[in-house]
Amino acid sequence: MTLYNQILNLPLFQGLSHDDLSNIVAHTKFDFTKVPAGSVIVKEGEPCKFLRFMLSGTAVVNSHADDNSFSVDEELSSPIMFEVERLFGLTQYHGHTITALTNCSLLVIKKDEVMRLSDKLLIIRINLLNRLATDVQKLSGLQWHQLPTSLTGRLLRFFALHTSYPAGHKVFHIKMQTLADNIRESRLNVSRQLNKWRDDGLITLSRGFIDIPRLETLLQLKDNP
């Protein structure tokens, strides 16, 4: 895939023609950069002054609870746009630490350039609004979902709510008691269910560590008691 096609597959530029993109590249400062495996791409708390796209590679997004009682590592693969919502609004700081798991290729655009492009091109503005509106609609819809009553349902809801994408490799750094407290269940029952999933090959367990190779496979259990 050519570099132009890679860019056209990114959420912000979908719907543009090659001619439109050529004109954008000619008049916009695009910063193409390589990030080696193990290097931090952005750090939580840093000002969000740039919009970053991962063109190739895999990154790990780390998120944590407000009280630091647990954290989640989530693998995300290219192509992807990182934290566009952090360019605007009340908190214009990165909310996650993102680290390159493999060698990654990034496209970085300054916030001012993003604003200029959205002002100049309707399709860019629509793509930007669609992304932000979709995220808001997903979040606002959660409050109307019926709370699961089964242990399986509550565990799966916890895993799904604390990840940004409901598929792929996730690692929860959480103590069994903390997980049990969060879903209002006994530690013994949570331990039994997790060990059953481990025996079924769905997760890997160790002390304070739940490794989920494919979250989408686990979430398929949602209709089971």
Image (spheres, rainbow, N blue to C red):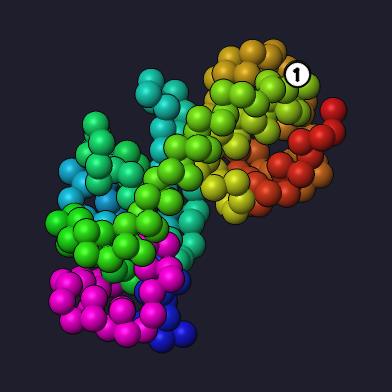
* Residue 203 inside the magenta-drawn segment: no
Residue nearer the viewer, 43 or 20: 20
Question: Dot 1: what SS?
Answer: loop
Q: Which residues are magenta?
A: 11-36
Asked if residue 1 can be seen in this view, the reply is yes
- Quarter of the rendering containing residue 177: top right
Query: Viewed as shown, does residue 198 lie left or right of 73?
Result: right
Left or right placement of residue 181 versus residue 77 in this view: right
**Relative image position of residue 217 (x, y in whole percent):** 73, 49
Rendered residue at 31%/78% (across/down): 21
Instruction: Report the quarter where the C terminus lies.
Output: top right
Residue at the farthest right position: 225
Q: Residue at x 34, y 71 (%)?
A: 105
Res 207 seen here: no
Q: Where residue 85 appears, x then y in whole percent?
A: 33, 44
Q: Position of residue 123 (x, y in %)?
A: 36, 64
User: Does 18 lie within the magenta span?
Assistant: yes
Q: Which residue is mark 1?
A: 149
Three-letter amino acid code of the residue under disc 1: Thr
Q: Dot 1 surroundings within 10 Å: few (below 14), some, or many (20 or more)?
A: few
- Give left or right: position of 176 versus 202: left
Q: Taking 80 as reference, is 8 above or below it?
A: below
| 155 over 88 or under it: above or below | above
Q: Position of residue 128 (x, y in %)?
A: 35, 54
Quarter of the image holding residue 90? top left
User: Horizontal placement of 112 versus 61: left or right?
Assistant: left
Report the residue at 25% width, 46% height from top: 87
